[in-house]
Each structure stands twice: as structure tokens, then as C-alpha cells.
Amino acid sequence: MAVAIVVAAGRGERLGHDRPKALVPLLGRPLLAWSLEALIGVTSLRRIVVVLPDGEPLPDDPAAWGLGPTSWTAPDGSARVVGVGGGRERSHSVRAGLAATGEGPPDEPVLVHDGARPLVTAALIAACLAGVRDGADAAIAAAAVTDTVKQARPADPSGALPRVDRTLDRSLLWAVQTPQVFRRDVLARALAEPDEVLAAATDDASLVEAAGGDVRLVAAPRSNLKVTLPEDLRLAELLLGDRDR
Ligand code: C5P
């Protein structure tokens, strides 16, 4: 068995909406409900912790989020999906989520997903879980980069155009997404780093890499996009609409 943490406690200011990003409507239900539905369908997940913005609890009735009536419960009637409050930075929210998963064996896979990625599929979730069961410390979704990527000097305060230092070898570059699945002991160790280290991490796998861990890439489609800007929300709407047809 495995557990999942969905981080959805960010404000999402770049989306320019008056609701927290996870709760912005997307085709008639909150953005977060789309990835939650995909995770709920994965029977090997014994518990799913949703990390929510303060003051925004999980609704008592999953139907309020367009989900089936038994979505929050395990077959034995116990709570399977639970909500907790988030932290200041993303990693703090993951730490709060991990604590709420309770106890588990050190090699138990713990899946971390951004609630802002509504297009995640059951197949991608299964592939990431399998990567850790095969012995890696972490298996993370990533899309091969299709753009040419250049490294430039930091922006000049004078407003001059940034000067390019070099062009990176595209054949070695991957744009990292979630799900990211970790062995429980590896994730717990990574999240025990000091607060300033956690605050600087833009994903959880980077903390494991920094400690010399074996992090593997699971090839993922670019369509597993993260909703950050208004145009991302429109694109997600179009892609999800296509899927239903
Ligand atoms: O800001 P960004 O889109 O990169 O955040 C990625 C994910 O982390 C989002 O799903 C967001 O809700 C979550 N997050 C969080 N707690 C924070 C900041 C971000 O759960 N303090």
C-alpha cells in the first residue's frame, strides 16, 4: 500500500482570482477536485491527505466538489481522504501532510502531488509508484524539454536586456512535474532540513538529490501542466473538455 499528499494550500496570486488557486472553478468543480478524483481511483492509496488553505476545510459532502458520495471513505468505512492546514512555504505544507499520514513502514511509497495539476492520470500515478517499488529513493514525473534553454546572467537593475551565458544541452533536460513519489524514510529525512533550506526548495525531490539520493525520472506528457497563470486555466479547461468527449 501507499499514501498520498496533495498540496493545495498556496494562494496562487499569479492566477489573479479572488479564491485560493485550488478552489478556483474549473469546468464546474474546484481545480483541486480533478487531481483528487484521479488519486481516489487508485486503490493502492490507503490514505490521501489534502493540504488546504487556512479556513478552507474539506467539505463534509464530497458532492460539493463534484465527487461521488463515498469519495472520502475507505471500504471499511474509515476516513480515507482527510484535510489539514498548510504551512508558509510549499515544503512546510508537504511536512504537515506527511505528519497527517500517520505511521507507516520506512519503505512505504509516499506520493506528493500539486493540487494545481488537474490533468494527472491514473497511468502516470501508477508509473511513479512503480518506480519507488522498484528500489529508487524517489520517482518523479517529468517531461522531456522541447524548447532550447539558455542560461543568462541575473537581470540588470538598469533594465538592460539579460546577457546569455550559454545554451544548455537540451537532450539532457527535463521539466519536472508532480506526482513525485518517495520512500517514506527518505522524504521524512529530506523534510527535516532547516526551515531556510526547505523554503528555497521548489520541489521535494531537489532535497533528496542534495542528500545524494537516487531520484529517477518517469516520462510524463507536457499536458500534465501546472495551473499558474490565467492562460493555464484556459488550457486545462480545453484539455479536460477534450478528455470527456
Ligand atoms: O506556487 P506553486 O504553484 O508552485 O505551488 C505548487 C503547489 O504547492 C500548489 O498546489 C500550491 O497550492 C502548493 N502550496 C502549498 N503551500 C504553500 C505554497 C504552495 O500547499 N505554502
Image (cartoon, helix red, strand yellow):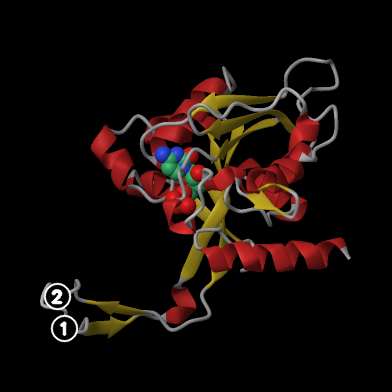
Above or below — where is 216 with respect to 36?
Answer: below
Residue labelled 2 has its Cβ within 8 Å of some atom of ligand 1: no
Occupied quadrant, residue 198: top left
Above or below — where is 39 with respect to 149?
Answer: above
**From the viewer's perspective, is 35 left or right of 243?**
left
Identify the element where label 2 is drawn.
Answer: loop
Q: Nearer the viewer, residue 146 or 56?
A: 56
Q: x, y percentage for residue 186?
A: 46, 35
Q: Residue at x 24, y 84 (%)?
A: 164
Q: Nearer the viewer, residue 26 or 107?
A: 26
**From the viewer's perspective, is 190 left or right of 227?**
left
What label does residue 156 carry, if any?
A: 2
Q: Is residue 114 visible?
A: no
Q: x, y percentage for residue 7?
A: 53, 39
Amino acid type, residue under disc 1 in the picture = Ala
Q: Residue at x 89, y 66 (%)?
A: 245
**From the viewer's perspective, is 115 left or right of 171?**
right
Amino acid type, residue under disc 2 in the picture = Asp
Q: Residue furthest left?
A: 158
Residue labelled 1 has its Cβ within 8 Å of some atom of ligand 1: no
Q: Tell me whether circle 1 and circle 2 mark residues in contact (CB < 8 Å).
A: yes
Q: Residue furthest front?
A: 18
Q: Residue at x 77, y 26 (%)?
A: 61
Which residue lies under the disc numbered 1?
Answer: 160
Q: Residues within 10 Å of mark 1 (few under 14, many from 20)?
A: few
Q: x, y percentage for residue 44?
A: 76, 34
Determine the CA span between mark 1 and mark 2.
6 Å
Occupied quadrant, residue 48: top right
Q: Is residue 17 visible?
A: yes
